[in-house]
């Protein structure tokens, strides 16, 4: 910091210098009283001159100080104005950026709120599904509903029945009616979820092995029950179908226990998941459609024969019409020939000119009609 640029410091320094000069002058006066009068006068004159010089210097210093103070004030004002403008611009930019950031943040928060709502809805659905799957009775109903929806989507209403009673008084979840001479197909829904979860959640290999045996035992028991209940009834074809409403369970059966799949098929029971059941239903629908086509073959043949008769009659009528068109064309050609001759004769009559013997053109001869002809007319 420059102390000499401060007016208060300069004024204090000037006052201190004046006091010092006053003391020096007094001391010199006291000393001069002890000397000669001429010397004293000379000293006083020099002191007066020096005081005048010092006063001029002090005046110049005061003027310079005042000028410097004005320049300093103007410089400070300019810098303060620039700083205020820069600070205002910076605050405006910061306000705009903050507003955009808050807007973006609000949009993202809205998205997060919607996502959170969807997550909450999904959590409720998952909890509901867990509550359904934790109850054996509800779990069985869930598998039956899924199986019924697939059957309704692929087959016509006349081709299936639900909760049908067989000839041995056993009730089956679904009975699919294949066209004669084929027998019906029995479909039963099973969901061994608890044993499968125990196998997959086992902590070590030994526990997985034990749980796997329990799982295969449960599946084998379901296969045996289906074979004993439904295949012993009349008009039930092999294989019966055991529907598993879980692709994961079906995949574990095929990858980890393929011998169980073969054993169940030899027992007359085919294990299917939703995807494989859809393929099976699609094949059944194709068989039904083919049988319907065969049943309606005689009707189609009779309709084809009638259609061939209609085509023969149409052909004869087209030939007759072609003959009429041919005769009409010949008549039109004869008419065109006659009109052509008439046109040629008309042109010759129009170009006819009579000349006399001298080569001069004579007036056209006038047609004289007898009075009797006029009277008769």
Image (spheres, rainbow, N blue to C red):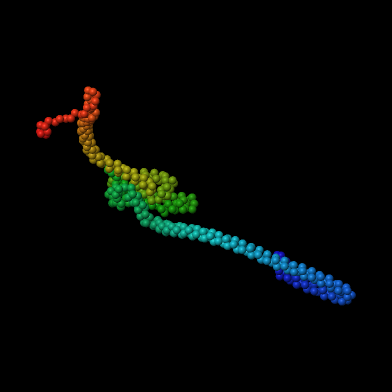
Q: Nearer the viewer, residue 140 or 280?
A: 280
Q: Residue at x 41, y 44 (%)?
A: 259
Residue 332 x, y percent position in the rendering: 22, 32
Residue furthest to the right in view is 36
Q: Residue at x 84, y 71 (%)?
A: 46
Image quarter of the N terminus: bottom right
Q: Nearer the viewer, residue 298 or 26?
A: 26
Question: Quick check: 350 left or right of 173?
Answer: left
Question: Quick check: 336 left or right of 266?
Answer: left
Q: Nearer the viewer, residue 5 or 253?
A: 5
Residue 238 x, y percent position in the rendering: 32, 44
Question: Quick check: 234 left or right of 254?
Answer: left
Vertical side of 196 occupied by 342: above or below: above
How many marks the image carries: the answer is: 0
Residue 340 can be seen, yes or no: no
Residue 229 x, y percent position in the rendering: 32, 49
**Residue 8, picture quadrant:** bottom right
Question: Quick check: 67 left or right of 105?
Answer: right
**Residue 323, picture quadrant:** top left
Image quarter of the C terminus: top left
Q: Residue at x 39, y 44 (%)?
A: 262
Residue 21 can be seen, yes or no: yes
Vertical side of 317 occupied by 60: above or below: below
Residue 314 x, y percent position in the rendering: 22, 36
């Amino acid at each position: 910091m420059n102390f000499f640029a401060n007016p208060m410091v300069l004024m204090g320094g000037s006052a201190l210098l004046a006091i010092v000069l006053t003391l020096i002058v007094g001391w010199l006066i006291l000393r001069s009283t002890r000397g000669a009068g001429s010397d004293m006068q000379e000293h006083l004159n020099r002191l007066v001159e020096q005081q005048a010089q010092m006063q001029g210097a002090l005046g110049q210093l005061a003027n310079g100080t005042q000028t410097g103070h004005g320049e300093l004030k103007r410089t400070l004002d300019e810098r303060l104005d620039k700083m205020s403008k820069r600070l205002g611009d910076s605050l405006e930019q910061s306000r705009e950026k903050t507003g955009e950031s808050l807007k973006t943040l609000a949009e993202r928060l809205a998205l997060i709120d919607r996502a959170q709502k969807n997550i909450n809805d999904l959590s409720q659905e998952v909890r509901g599904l867990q509550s359904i799957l934790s109850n054996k009775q509800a779990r069985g109903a869930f598998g039956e509903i899924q199986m019924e929806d697939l059957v309704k989507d692929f087959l016509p209403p006349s081709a299936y029945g639900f909760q049908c009673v067989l000839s041995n008084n056993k009730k089956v979840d679904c009975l699919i009616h294949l066209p004669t001479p084929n027998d019906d197909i029995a479909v039963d829904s099973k969901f061994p979820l608890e044993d499968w979860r125990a196998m997959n959640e086992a902590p070590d290999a030994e526990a997985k092995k034990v749980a796997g045996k329990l799982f295969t035992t449960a599946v084998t028991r379901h296969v045996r029950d289906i074979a004993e209940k439904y295949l012993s009834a009349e008009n039930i074809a092999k294989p019966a179908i055991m529907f598993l409403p879980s692709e994961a369970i079906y995949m574990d059966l095929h990858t980890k226990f393929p011998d169980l799949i073969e054993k169940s098929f030899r027992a007359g029971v085919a294990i299917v998941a939703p995807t494989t059941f859809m393929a099976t239903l699609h094949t059944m629908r194709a068989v039904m459609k083919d049988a319907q086509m065969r049943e309606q073959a005689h009707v189609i043949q009779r309709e084809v024969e009638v259609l061939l008769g209609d085509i023969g009659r149409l052909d004869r009528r087209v030939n007759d019409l072609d003959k009429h068109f041919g005769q009409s064309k010949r008549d039109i050609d004869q008419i065109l020939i006659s009109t052509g001759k008439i046109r040629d004769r008309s042109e010759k009559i129009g170009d006819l000119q009579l000349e006399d013997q001298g080569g001069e053109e004579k007036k056209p001869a006038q047609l004289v009609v007898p009075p009797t002809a006029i009277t008769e007319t």
